Amino acid sequence: APLAVVHFRHPHKYKTTKSLFIAAEGIFTGQFVHCGKKAKLAVGNVLPLSAIPEGTIVFNIEERPGDRGKLAKTSGASCTVVSHNLDEGVTRVRLPSGIKKKLKSSCRATIGIAAGGGRLDKPLLKAGRAYHKYKAKRNSWPKVRGVAMNP
């Protein structure tokens, strides 16, 4: 998924710090992105699951509080907040696979859908593009059928 460089004010010194975020669908250059409990419910903002209402679409969710996001990070991925259990401090989230997972309500998530959806809709068209695509990943191309090999 495409990345966004976000500038934050340094908490102690007079300078800015840069962070790489997964870009949300619809954010633009110069947009203000807010993080924290008091952030508004707007696309690109990062909030704890406890502050996100049910039915909201989110991505880049933390599995454990403070792990910087592990779930639904690929291009076009999103999850839905299903329900909150305030007594246990647990939130149920529907993952892209359809599984409903219980996560701590203090885990953070980004509002919206991860940018770059529809990336796989365009065909590769030629062998060279497939070669370079899989060269960067792992040795899984070309696939030779067993029938075509010598005994």
Image (cartoon, rainbow, N blue to C red):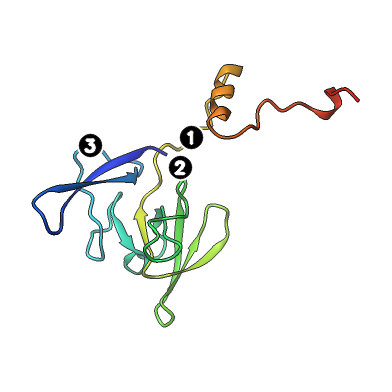
Q: Give the residue at mark 1.
A: 118
Question: Relative to 87, does residue 48 appear above or below in the rendering?
Answer: above
Residue at the far left: name it: 14
Q: Give the residue at mark 3.
A: 29
User: Callout 2: 10 Å neighbours few (<14), some, many (20+)?
Assistant: some
Q: Quadrant of residue 88?
A: bottom left
Q: Amino acid at mark 3?
A: Thr
Q: Quadrant of residue 53?
A: bottom left
Q: Residue at x 12, y 59 (%)?
A: 12
Q: CA distance from mark 3 to mark 1?
A: 22 Å
* 50 relative position to 34: left or right: right
For marks 2 and 1, the one nearer the N-term is: 2
Q: Residue at x 19, y 39 (%)?
A: 30
Q: Residue at x 35, y 54 (%)?
A: 110
Q: Give the residue at mark 2.
A: 76
The spot of residue 7 in percent (x, y) is 20, 46
Residue at the far right: name it: 151
Q: Quadrant of the N terminus?
A: top left
For marks 3 and 1, the one nearer the N-term is: 3
Residue 43 vs residue 69, the one in the foreground: 69
